Image: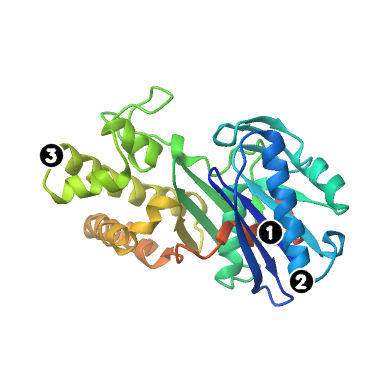
């Protein structure tokens, strides 16, 4: 059995996978604030799951953790996890000492990419990009069955790709980045409030909300286009909080694909609409992916 833990800013989700890769047990705990509480939450989650299947934590085949922030996957160190109050935490080492078992740690978006890859049942000849639309925007990449992090760990950080020189400024002071158009923080910087509030205002006809909503759809469609044109992945899976829009997001995004295809035979040949999917919102994708970290190596 494998254990996967997904540490989020509010809650921590954890799962046990059986030999077939199906979820045998799951749980959710509130995530504590600060390094000590984050470590305690992860430890408690693994121990409770071990108790639910009647074994010691050291008996699990693998234990993996997905967590926001900059992750040194080789050493299990987490830095700059601001939403958790963590400046630096040797999570892998400390958790392994507490549980008496080896632990793999990975960025949560990368873990979710691996989870989506296995949930879709793709074989190792296939490739997938997981486009996370949450507080920020980034992608996790699985190429040939392995996580791809790039030479410096920046692979998939497409939120910094600029697509509109006259667009709103992002946190770096640059105009029209994908993240400022299609993430929770970016949308709030254009129109204060939540994404849900923006959508409700757009439905009521508010001009600013309509403009921001249009930018959201353009940002998502452009992100998919960037991922397909640079990596030619088989599948682009959209996840994160904004993905809960479901067809309300996919419909307009596919409509933009159709507009591009109407003037470009090459874009038509890419079949963008056929490659995009949204997994069910409560599918524990990141926790599932974390459980597979013990068997998957990341590549430079």
Crowd band around label 1 with a 10 angstrom C-alpha radius: few (<14), some (14–19), many (20+): many
> Which residue does the numbered mark 2 point to in the structure image?
53
Q: Residue furthest top?
A: 173
In this figure, which residue is indicated by the disc labeled 1?
Answer: 4
- Mark toward the viewer: 1 or 3: 1
Neighbor class of circle 2 (other Cα within 10 Å; few <14, some 14-19, many 20+) is: few
User: Separation of disc 1 and disc 3 at Cα?
Assistant: 44 Å
Q: Nearer the viewer, mark 1 or mark 2?
A: 2
Mark count: 3
Quadrant assignment, res 85: top right
**What numbered label is drawn on residue 207?**
3
Q: Residue 32 location, x and y as percent?
A: 62, 41
Disc 1 vs disc 3: Cβ atoms closer than 8 Å? no
Name which residue lies at 33% across and 45% down.
219
Q: Image point 29% across, 48% down: which residue?
A: 196
Q: CA distance from mark 1 to mark 2?
A: 14 Å
Residue placed most toward the observer, 107 or 224: 107
Most extreme residue toward the bottom, as rendered? 20
- SS at mark 3 in the image: helix
* Of the image marks 1 and 2, the number of the one nearer the N terminus: 1
């Amino acid at each position: 059995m494998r254990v996967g833990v997904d540490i989020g800013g509010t809650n921590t989700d954890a799962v046990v996978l059986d030999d077939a890769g199906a979820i045998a047990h799951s749980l959710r705990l509130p995530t504590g604030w600060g390094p000590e509480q984050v470590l305690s939450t992860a430890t408690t989650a693994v121990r409770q799951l071990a108790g639910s299947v009647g074994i010691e934590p050291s008996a699990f085949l693998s234990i993996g953790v997905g967590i926001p922030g900059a992750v040194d996957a080789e050493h299990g160190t987490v830095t700059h996890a601001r939403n958790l109050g963590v400046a630096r935490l040797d999570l892998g080492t400390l958790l392994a000492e507490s549980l008496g078992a080896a632990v793999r740690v990975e960025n949560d978006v990368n873990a979710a990419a691996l989870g989506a890859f296995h949930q879709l049942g793709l074989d190792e000849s296939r490739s997938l990009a997981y486009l996370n639309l949450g507080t920020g925007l980034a992608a996790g990449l699985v190429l040939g069955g392995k996580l791809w992090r790039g030479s410096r760990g920046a692979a998939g950080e497409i939120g910094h790709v600029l697509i509109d020189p006259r667009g709103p400024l992002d946190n770096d002071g640059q105009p029209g980045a994908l993240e400022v158009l299609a993430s929770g923080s970016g949308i709030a910087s254009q129109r204060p409030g939540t994404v849900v509030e923006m959508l409700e205002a757009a439905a009521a006809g508010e001009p600013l909300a309509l403009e921001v909503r249009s930018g959201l759809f353009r940002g998502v469609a452009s992100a998919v286009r960037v991922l397909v044109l640079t990596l030619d992945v088989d599948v682009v899976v959209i996840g994160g909080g904004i993905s809960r829009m479901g067809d309300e997001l996919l419909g307009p995004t596919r409509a933009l694909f159709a507009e591009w295809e109407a003037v470009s035979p090459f874009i038509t040949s890419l079949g963008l609409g056929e490659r995009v999917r949204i997994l069910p919102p409560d599918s524990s994708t990141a926790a599932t992916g974390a459980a597979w970290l013990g068997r998957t190596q990341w590549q430079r």
